[in-house]
Amino acid sequence: DTAVSQTPKYLVTQMGNDKSIKCEQNLGHDTMYWYKQDSKKFLKIMFSYNNKELIINETVPNRFSPKSPDKAHLNLHINSLELGDSAVYFCASKDRGWTEAFFGQGTRLTVV
Amino acid sequence: SQQGEEDPQALSIQEGENATMNCSYKTSINNLQWYRQNSGRGLVHLILIRSNEREKHSGRLRVTLDTSKKSSSLLITASRAADTASYFCATDNGNNRLAFGKGNQVVVIP
């Protein structure tokens, strides 16, 4: 069983469209994250949720809206996609305390 | 926001050699973690070192942490071709913020 799964794995879309990426974890973790990895492989935290509550919201444009219907799911909705949104987006989850994070396989978003 | 920053960013070595990469950060931490990312894949956790620890070993991996210098190093001994990957350090400040740096690309030549 995949611990953290994201769908879709690849997403190609035109500028201006709205798209969603889904993430689910079956580890029972309370904390989930969204990260953006750019072409230089820099991995930047976007959001962190703890038990469905938004904990961290980095300076991300408000076109990005995370939604956590329950603590096992953290979806990312992006409105009015721009070329600069092209990147690989990773979902991750982590248990409480001093523990490691588990990552999904990533969603490669290409905006054309 | 705090970030791990690795140095150097690209390393090419022969199989059997050791690979060392460094990471520096800016603020206080609870622990520091190292991850590996194979091309086109997600990150996989390698090792975690707590702020009160100075050194930790796991198989061929050795991590050091110097909180006075806000730096850490990852040593991979007797490298193998399968170690070819990007390596990231991440700082955990205990407030649900797990911040990553740019990563080191390591290429092990068979």
Image: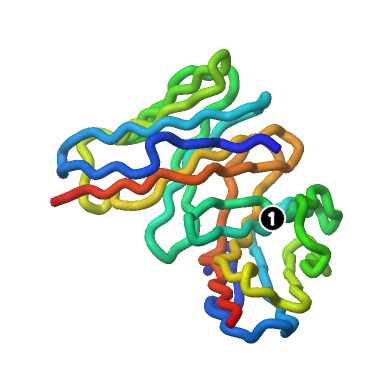
Q: Position of residue A50 (x, y in %)?
A: 79, 51
Pick the front one: A104 or A64: A64
Q: How is the image coloured?
A: rainbow
Q: Position of residue B69 (x, y in %)?
A: 54, 16
Pick the front one: A19 or B58: A19
Query: Which residue extends farthest right?
Result: A53
Q: Residue at x 72, y 84 (%)?
A: A17
Disc 1: host chain: A
Q: Is residue B62 above or below residue B40?
A: above
Q: Residue at x 55, y 66 (%)?
A: A88
- Please name the residue that numbered disc 1 is placed on: A33
Pick the front one: B46 or A57: A57
Left or right relative to B23: residue B79 = left
Pick the front one: A51 or B38: B38
Q: Residue at x 42, y 28 (%)?
A: B73
State the quadrant of the N terminus of chain B.
top right
Q: Residue at x 69, y 33 (%)?
A: B93
Q: Is residue B88 above or below residue A13?
A: above
Q: Position of residue B58 (x, y in %)?
A: 38, 33
Circle 1: residue type = Tyr
Determine whether the residue tagged by mark 1 lies in a helix, strand or loop: strand
Q: Is residue A68 above or below residue A93?
A: below
Categorize mark 1 by other alpha carbons within 10 Å: few (<14), some (14-19), many (20+): many
Left or right relative to B62: residue B35 = right
Q: Quadrant of residue A27?
A: bottom right
Query: Which residue extends farthest top?
Result: B68
Left or right relative to A88: residue B57 = left
What is the number of callouts on the image? 1
